[in-house]
Image (cartoon, rainbow, N blue to C red):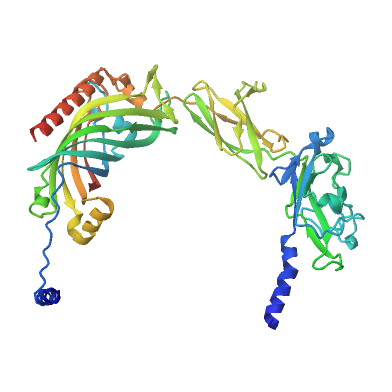
Amino acid sequence: MSTPLRAGLVLLLVSSPALAQQLSLAFNGGTVTNFPFNQGSCNNNDSYIVTWTASSLTGACSTMQIFVTTGQSCPDSPNTSGSSADGGTGTGTPDVIIATVSQTDLQAGSGTIQAQQLRNIPSLNGSCPDGVTFTNAVCASVKYTVGTVGSGCDSLAKSSTNLTLQYDAQPPVPPGMNLLPQDAKIQVQLNAQGETLKRFEVQYAEAPPGDAGPDWRQGPNLEATKTSVAITGLTNGVEYVVQARSVDVVDNVSAFNAPLSATPQASNGFWGEYKAAGGHDTGGCSTAGAAFPSALGALGVLVALLRRRR
Amino acid sequence: MRATAVAVLLAATTASAQTVVQIKPPPPPEPSIGFFIELRMGTLIPRVGDEPGLSSNPYETIFGNKSMLYGGGEFGFIFWRGYGSASVGFSAGYAEKYAPALLVTAGPDNGQPSTEKTALIIFPLRVPLSYRFDLTWTRWGIPLVPYAKLALLMTPWRVTKGGSTEVVNGLSGSGMKWGYGFTIGVAFVLNVLSPQMAKDMVTDTGIRTTYVFAEYNYDKLDDFGKVGLNLSARYFTFGLGFGF
């Protein structure tokens, strides 16, 4: 065998196992990679479940450690001391190992670890503080042997999916708002200020006389993917005040924005203008409808006659 | 046996020495029936103001002198060919016009544009009976084909304000209008520009003629003279057609 051919074969043998290692994590077997939760979930001791899958890890030579780290990306191995010298993120907060999977269990190819309390992620360390946001990554790593038996146990397989746990105890910013007064309704235009939201909540009231406070009524909610919603059933010529607030994906609620006022006004569309000008039409299908089948029948007879003559 | 072989050889040699005359087959006759598909566009202004008794033209009040953009298609079945051709078909279209609604207040804002849009939307449907003087093309090779149509019209219509059908005093701004219409037009047969491509299209797609056309439409769409919303219009349309 020629030297280049032999070298290529060796390279292929060495590289193939490395390429085939596959280690992935998921939240309860799903496809969601980010798990946001709020202060309520933290206080309620809610938990999360992680599943793992591994393929072609026949050369595994250590246990697989599944751990949560304070960073948003995964280090090679858990930093149990919290120092940067230990190979971790070096934030001073040690990573939390949530499961250790034996080499034997690894051969099963997949598994589910015991439910873990959300409040035990490294950044929270058992507490549920106000007004902060933390994101921790869930990682897995295992060492394996490359090549022939007896080689060093020094190659590392890391989870390919980057799972994150996001603690969000920070209320969103109130939405930007614009009002368009229309006929017996007010069109409320809303826009998110900053983070991704779940919805907007709208309240409205008739503008109170003097110093009296508004008697707020619940208006329509608006999905955050949309930008405007109408408050309908209003009285033209009456001034209304409107306020709105943001609700983020973990149900944190912002304060209401500063109320704006608007007065619905009657308007005529084309139909209104037509009727105002004395139009006689009343809409709907006219009685002339009988003419259509008649004329269509006549047309059919005509065509038949022409065909017959031919 | 040998004599036969020599005779065949001689015959072949004689044949090869003759001048080869290729007889071009005559073009296939036009089939007695066929069909066509047309796509057309145009602009129109409905003659709403023609309704007797109106104090003003509401179309002009709302939309000004701006036209509705119209687009549509037609399928026609050619049932007779003789001195020209006759067909019956079905045509469907769509036209719309949007503008701000007008405020109705006791103050100075009265008549000013609102933040709400209003629209007149119509869906013109027609059953046309048409005659094409297509001998100009099939017999004389002149690529201009005049034609005329008489059509029965049926047009569902709808008025919206703020995205939903406008209702005034309990009367919904939607309905159906009936009428009739005349069309005259002329088609320019594109086959003349590239006869070879035209032949290929017949072979490949079955399209015998491709043409562009311009036509003038006179639509009387007022429920056959009944007083009411008048959607009659006189307008030009232009389009592209394919004959099969």
Relative to A144, is A127 above or below? above
Say if residue A67 shows up in the picture.
no
Q: In this view, does B227 lie to the left or right of A125?
A: left
Relative to B181, is A285 above or below? above
Question: Where's residue B108, x and y in %?
Answer: 42, 29
Question: Where's residue B213, x and y in %?
Answer: 20, 48
- The front one of B125 and A250 is B125
Task: Please state, as top left, top right, bottom left or bottom right, where the N terminus of chain A lies in the image.
Answer: bottom right
Residue at the right extreme, as displayed: A81
Question: Where's residue B220, x and y in %?
Answer: 19, 29
Examine the image and state in which quarter residue A276 appears. Answer: top left
Say if residue A301 shows up in the picture.
yes
Examine the image and state in which quarter residue A154 appears. Answer: bottom right
- The front one of A207 and B151 is B151
**Residue ID at (11%, 29%):** A305
- The front one of A98 and B49 is A98
Task: Please state, as top left, top right, bottom left or bottom right, where the C terminus of chain A lies in the image.
Answer: top left
Residue at the front extreme, as displayed: B1
Q: Is residue B95 left or right of residue A14?
A: left
